[in-house]
Amino acid sequence: MLIVKSKYRIAKRLGAGIFEQTQNQKFALAEARKKIKRGRGASDYGKQLLEKQRVRFTYGLGERQLSNYAKAAFEEKEPSRALHIALEMRADNATYRAGFAPTRRAARQATSHGHITINGKRITTPSYRVKKGDVISIREGSRKSPLFAGLAEAKEEGGRAVPGWLVVDLALLRAEVVGEPQYSQMEVGLDYPTVFEFYSR
């Protein structure tokens, strides 16, 4: 499991969007100042390394995991789209996107501890890839756990937006995969072509 010693230290280096806890106005301003100071001094390798690390920490992956995803995606017709789909449709990320966990790290723990089911079957592999038609649920025996308390109330108060490829019913603790994520660098905020450049060196 990837262990993050200091989320704030890493976010200062890689950007506020890496961790949910650092997505606030303070970090946004710090990131804007950093971009101004950085200017044109960074080397191509430095930019590639930075972007690779941003993707790795955003999804909580080990170096080998991301390398394997990138190599597989690079063989596809649209590498950036393929990589984005592979990362977004991991079971832990889908659990997070559905609003069943406050962070990807919490979603990974919930998945690995067997609290999540796919099509009624309990899974313990965070990297399990969901597909269109799959139904993600919180296991019946886990629904009274403090981990999932107040999910419906949080949604009513205006929680995190659910992506269009998921249809979620928090009252039933159920989410259905109805499509695939779409990749737009502007919207996603991650530059996958630069990641491919890093691994092509």
Image: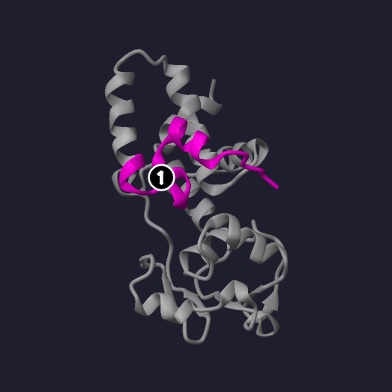
Question: What span is colored magenta in the figure?
Answer: 1-27
* Majority secondary structure of magenta residues: helix
Image position, residue 67 (x, y; %): 61, 36
Q: Nearer the viewer, residue 196 or 23?
A: 23
Image position, residue 199 (x, y; %): 55, 28
Q: Is residue 158 magenta?
A: no
**Based on the displayed image, in which of its 4 quarters is residue 29 positioned?**
top left
For residue 20, side relative to residue 109 (left or right)? left
Name the residue at 65% across, 66% down.
Answer: 110
Q: Is residue 80 above or below residue 107?
A: above
> Under tag 1, what secondary structure?
helix
Image position, residue 188 (x, y; %): 36, 48
Name the residue at 42% across, 48% down.
Answer: 81
Q: Is residue 17 magenta?
A: yes
**Based on the displayed image, in which of its 4 quarters is residue 15 positioned?**
top left
Q: Is residue 178 above or below residue 41?
A: below
- Tell me the kind of residue under disc 1: Gly
Q: Which residue is mark 1?
A: 17
Quadrant in the picture for the C terminus:
top right
Name the residue at 49% across, 56% down.
Answer: 88
Name the residue at 57% across, 65% down.
Answer: 130
Label total for image: 1
Q: Is residue 8 above or below residue 36?
A: below
Q: Is residue 86 above or below residue 54?
A: below
